[in-house]
Amino acid sequence: MNTEHEKIRQEMILLLPRLRAFGWSLTRDAAAADDLVQLTCEKALRALSSFEYGTRLDAWMFRIMRNSFLDERRGPRHLALAADISEREIEDLNGAARIEDRLELRAVGRAMAALDPGQREVLMLVGVEGLRYREAAEALGLPIGTVMSRLARARRALAAMLGRSDDTTKEVRHEG
């Protein structure tokens, strides 16, 4: 086996938690997110020869995941969208959190679920995963300006839903 391919496979394993988080942001369902992660990994492994070494593996896999999700939505086996975070998922994400933290997390989860899917995708990739605007644009197949405007709208919408003023959503720029 090619040592580069083996290195990529090891990096994929390290990406699994991030892939699951992005999958959940798309599907809003833990089981559907796990299925989407599995499908993404299978497709990535089959297409490993098309991966450009020296580029970001995470951005490549996020793009595969998003495209797979969109393909599923267009197909007969539509992945379900949940409107809320279950108490168990909150416990999993924030084990020993105090009640206030769990309530805040629940509110943020509901606000994220209420976002337009395009805004939620951009917010997850830039705000949570730390991709630069350019990398998120490449992963989503969008112009960089669209990524920036969706991110700004998502931040404003979250601030409004969570009852915060716009100054609390000052962006951390991920230029480039």
Image (cartoon, rainbow, N blue to C red):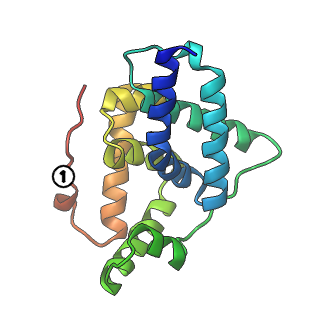
At 35% from the left edge and 86% from the top edge, which residue is drawn? 99
Secondary element at image label 1: loop
At 52% from the left edge and 29% from the top edge, which residue is drawn? 9
Q: Position of residue 28 (x, y in %)?
A: 58, 59
Q: Residues within 10 Å of mark 1 (few under 14, many from 20)?
A: few
User: Label 1 is placed on what type of residue?
Assistant: Lys
Is residue 82 depicted above or below 53 in this figure?
below
Residue furthest to the bottom: 99
Q: Is there any visible trace of residue 137 in the rendered image?
A: yes
Q: Which of 163 and 127 lies nearest the eye of the viewer? A: 127
Is residue 99 depicted above or below 26 in this figure?
below
Instruction: Assign the N terminus to one quadrant of the image.
Output: top right
At 79% from the left edge and 40% from the top edge, which residue is drawn? 75
Residue that numbered label 1 is attached to: 170
Q: Position of residue 134 (x, y in %)?
A: 33, 26
Q: Which of 55 and 127 lies nearest the eye of the viewer? A: 55
Instruction: Assign the C terminus to one quadrant of the image.
Output: top left
Q: Is there any visible trace of residue 141 in the rendered image?
A: no
Q: Which of 61 and 115 lies nearest the eye of the viewer? A: 61
Q: Position of residue 159 (x, y in %)?
A: 30, 63
Q: Position of residue 127 (x, y in %)?
A: 32, 47
Task: State left or right for residue 78 relative to residue 131.
Answer: right
